[in-house]
Image (cartoon, rainbow, N blue to C red):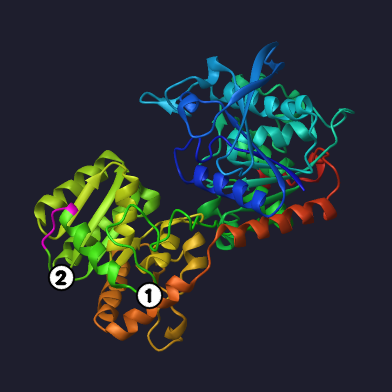
Amino acid sequence: MKILMLASEAVPLAKTGGLADVVGALAVELTRLGHEVRLVLPRYRGLEDGPVALRETHRFRVPLRHDHVEVALETGTLKGDKGPVVCVRYDPFFDRPGLYGDAAGDYPDNLDRFALFCRAAIEACKELGWAPDIVHAHDWQTALAIVYLKTLYQSDTTWTAPRTLFTIHNMGYQGLFPPAEYPATGLPAADFTAGGLEFYGQINLLKGGMIYADLLNTVSPTYAKEIQTPEYGYRLEGVLQTRKDRLFGIINGIDYDVWNPTTDAHISANYSQKDMSGKKTCKTALRRELKLPQRDVPLLGMVSRLALQKGIDLLVDTLPKLLALDVQMVMLGSGDALYQAELTNLSERFVGKFAVRLGFDDGLAHRIEAGADMFVMPSRYEPCGLNQLYSLRYGTIPVVRKTGGLADTVVPYLPGHAVEKATGFVFEDAHPEVLLSTLYLALQVYRDKTEWADLIKRGMKQDFSWKRSAKEYVALYERALVETKPAAPPDRDTFPRGRFR
């Protein structure tokens, strides 16, 4: 199967968050499964010094507003012959310090930037003489490619219409722009309607991808259900309800070549399910690194963006009572200045019990997963989540809120109810006292060494590899090829207007 993978970031070339990990790993795994995958990204600043050797192969002109501009294609191969990468180079748009913005905020011309990228990605296939069976686009930055295939390219006789899959990684990021910028899309005015890209008077690129794609998916089955409700739908739940028969959930995988305690070069000692002795060494080393005293008490860990979505407010309200117990906690993260200040104050108040490191350090993230006894994720919403999957692999028991992918991947420990299947601790209500009571339960079970060891073993046996997830994506691609017709614009007259506004 020929698969065009469109994304604004992917490891190992460009990364600001989990999207890059998902796209990069999925492209590699699909290639391993024997599919012909071409990963297309913008050519950002610094890629010339990156891990993939890129060389210019083509130049061509692409429409931009009322003009045309010349773009270049630079191609390379992922290390280990893991598939080709194609980068769209247009320095006025992509030779910048950040992918989406700088210290002043989002770039004001992001609509122009990603409209150009989407047009160029489609034209690149024509320049390369390569017709994909599937176009798989990720998040708002690539949504216009889906729209273009069903509008501007619908009658293009040089283009064999592929089927399309649009993946929503987080409903909170929609690509909203003022209506005056609509000419940047290059689309007819007829598409700026409630049944198209219009959203409460603004342009909404995510909505465009949701409406025009043959199939949709998000990154967990539970999140696919949640986003059809007002609580999680960000005012797009009506669109998703209308397309619910074309909406699916696939759990992200993790790269066990990177996240594996038996081979991890970031940690002080390697260990496995058969020999856990190295985990104790990792715990000792983590305490030493973060200047906590060596004591025989439970060590909790957390690696997170410091944002309301991640439930940091719940944690801040919980910590004084939690740290009054005989426990220690380490935390790594950055984000909201208010949360950074509150966590710093708590670390000064509870010296020797709570250590926080502000910023991001990939090596330390690995060491926290390896050295902690429990990993805390009190997210208000979590489309998939990756840290709970890392924790299971590292024998670190997750304590999570029942939402999105957390609900799909952690089997709750419920006293008296099939504890032999449990892999972690789960709470439902987003309230500090509920989080605290769940942590109390986890600490109680921790004292039962046999029960705790059983929890660890069950977690480490779980399979959340990318091979498993990639096969589910292949099944969706096959479904798109068999069940859907070639790209055609949606019939707006069939859309209940109120559900789209």
Q: Is residue 158 left or right of residue 275?
A: right
Relative depth, front residue between 427 and 94: 94
Say the numbered circle drawn on residue 325: 2
Q: Secondary structure at mark 2?
A: loop
Q: Name the residue: 64% across, 56% down.
A: 470
Q: Is residue 501 visible?
A: no
| Residue at the image point whose x is 46% and y is 25% from the top | 46
Q: Position of residue 141 (x, y in %)?
A: 58, 34
Asked which secondary structure carries label 1, the reply is: helix
The image quadrant where one finds the C terminus is: top right
Q: Is residue 121 left or right of residue 90?
A: right
Horizontal side of 107 relative to 489 (left or right) equals left
| 3D distance between C-alphas at marks 2 and 1 | 23 Å
Q: Is residue 292 magenta?
A: yes
> From which residue to which does the magenta span run?
289-293
| Discs 2/1, front | 1
Quarter-of-image position of residue 149: top right
Look at the picture and state if 170 lies above or below 52: below
Q: Is residue 104 above or below residue 437?
A: above
* Residues under numbered marks 2 and 1 in contact, where contact means CB atoms less than 8 Å apart: no
Residue 129: % across, % down? 80, 29
**Of the numbered discs in the image, which one, if any, rests on residue 456?**
1
Q: Residue at x 29, y 80 (%)?
A: 445
Say which amino acid is labelled 2: Leu
Residue at the extreme front: 80
